[in-house]
Image (cartoon, rainbow, N blue to C red):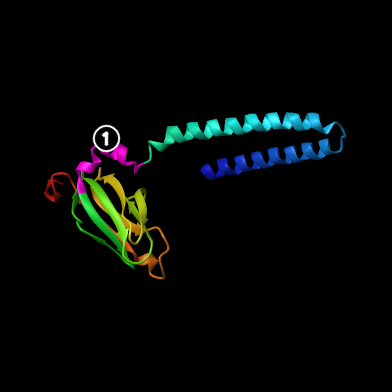
Amino acid sequence: MYQQIAMYATVFFVFLLALAFAFVYGESKRSGEYSTIQEKGYKIRKFYFLGLIAIMAFATVMTLGRLPYDSNQAEAEGLNEGKVVKVTGIQYAWEMSEETFKAGDKVQFDVTASDVTHGFGLYNENMELVAQTQAMPGYTNTVYYTFKEPGTYQILCLEYCSAGHHVMVKEIVVEPEGGASDE
């Protein structure tokens, strides 16, 4: 569905662009006083530029605070009070300081790499990406996630790291909140 919407939007905008070029081409044949046209163009450009800046500033303010890895949001939601798990990406595995989780656990993943850059991608059982960050040598990125559902999660490398990239998979089993015996 989204691809069809994108296709129709692309065709529409290409059509508008073609109209703009046709208009400019048609107007270029007319001769006239250039200074009045230039003055109008500068006014339009100034308002267009200011309007564009206002739209971008509004979009930034509205969306910046909702980023999933915003430390202020994580602190406000109490995610910093959960488990802290050290994760290191190595060719071709993930090493974790802790691998046992229960539903409801709030986890702070401190992710780094020991060799090359990797992409830490946490997937749920439906293979939906639920958390991600970069794993870079000499740098630690933090990502927060609360395991809401029990099940088998997978950590996959999202950055092509070498020939064995495709085998860089780690499975995490998240047990029900009271433990495996509650099922």
Q: Position of residue 82 (x, y in %)?
A: 20, 44
Q: Residue at x 20, y 58 (%)?
A: 97
Up the image or down, 47 lies above or below 155; here it is: above
- In the image, the segment drawn in magenta is 68-83
Q: Residues within 10 Å of mark 1 (few under 14, many from 20)?
A: few
Q: Position of residue 93 (x, y in %)?
A: 30, 65
Question: In the rendered view, does 130 fall on the left or right side of 47?
Answer: left
Give residue 39's quadrant in the image: top right
Q: Residue at x 55, y 34 (%)?
A: 53
Q: Position of residue 162 (x, y in %)?
A: 41, 69
Question: In the rendered view, does 83 fall on the left or right side of 140?
Answer: left
Q: Residue at x 25, y 45 (%)?
A: 147
Give residue 104's quadrant in the image: top left
Question: In the rendered view, does 174 fall on the left or right side of 133?
Answer: left
Q: SS class of the residue under badge 1? A: helix
Front-most of residues 19 and 112: 112
Front-most of residues 38 and 131: 38
Q: Position of residue 92 (x, y in %)?
A: 33, 67
Give residue 26's quadrant in the image: top right
Task: Please name the residue that numbered disc 1 is placed on.
Answer: 76
Up the image or down, 87 lies above or below 49; here it is: below
Q: Decide if residue 1 is in sight here.
A: no
Look at label 1 and name its amino acid. Answer: Ala
Front-most of residues 63 and 156: 63
